[in-house]
Amino acid sequence: MELQPTSRWNHKYKLVVEGHNLVVKQIKSWILREHQEHEMKEAADCTLAEVRRKISETTNCLKLIRQLRKLRQLRKDQAERKGLSPSFFLFQMTLI
């Protein structure tokens, strides 16, 4: 059975429309995938920034603790040089 000219044209038109629809669907899928990847990267960047901030804060706190320990040791040494008893020194430390 041979197709009539209008039938052939309709058939070709349907093939073109189907091809076009397929390309449009693939492009939409690609755009959606790119958008999702972009959102995931932004979320990962936010999380990484927060982790880095917390690491920085922790490092600063540890530095402060080390400095306070050194200060406590210096005060203890100074009290011992002055001949004050360790209990007096401990009493002074609780007041701080």
Image: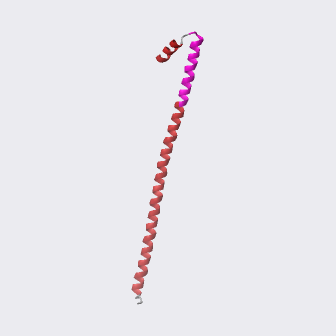
**In which quadrant is the N terminus drawn?**
bottom left
> Where does residue 42 sit, x and y in percent of width and height?
48, 49
Residue 91 or 60: which is nearer the viewer? 91
x%, y% of residue 69?
A: 55, 23
Answer above or below: position of 47 versus 15.
Answer: above
Of the pair 1 and 8, the residue shown nearer to us: 1
Spot the residue most to the right. Answer: 81
Q: Magenta includes 11?
A: no
Q: Which residues are magenta?
A: 62-83
Q: For this view, does 34 lie left or right of residue 6?
A: right
Which residue is located at x 51 percent, y 34 percent?
58
Residue 70 is a magenta residue = yes
Whether 77 is drawn above or below 57: the answer is above
Residue 88: x, y in percent?
A: 51, 12
Q: Main secondary structure of the magenta part?
A: helix
Residue 62 in the image, given as x and y percentages of width and height: 54, 31
Residue at 51 percent across and 13 percent down: it is 87
Q: Residue at x 47, y 62 (%)?
A: 30
Outermost residue toward the bottom? 1
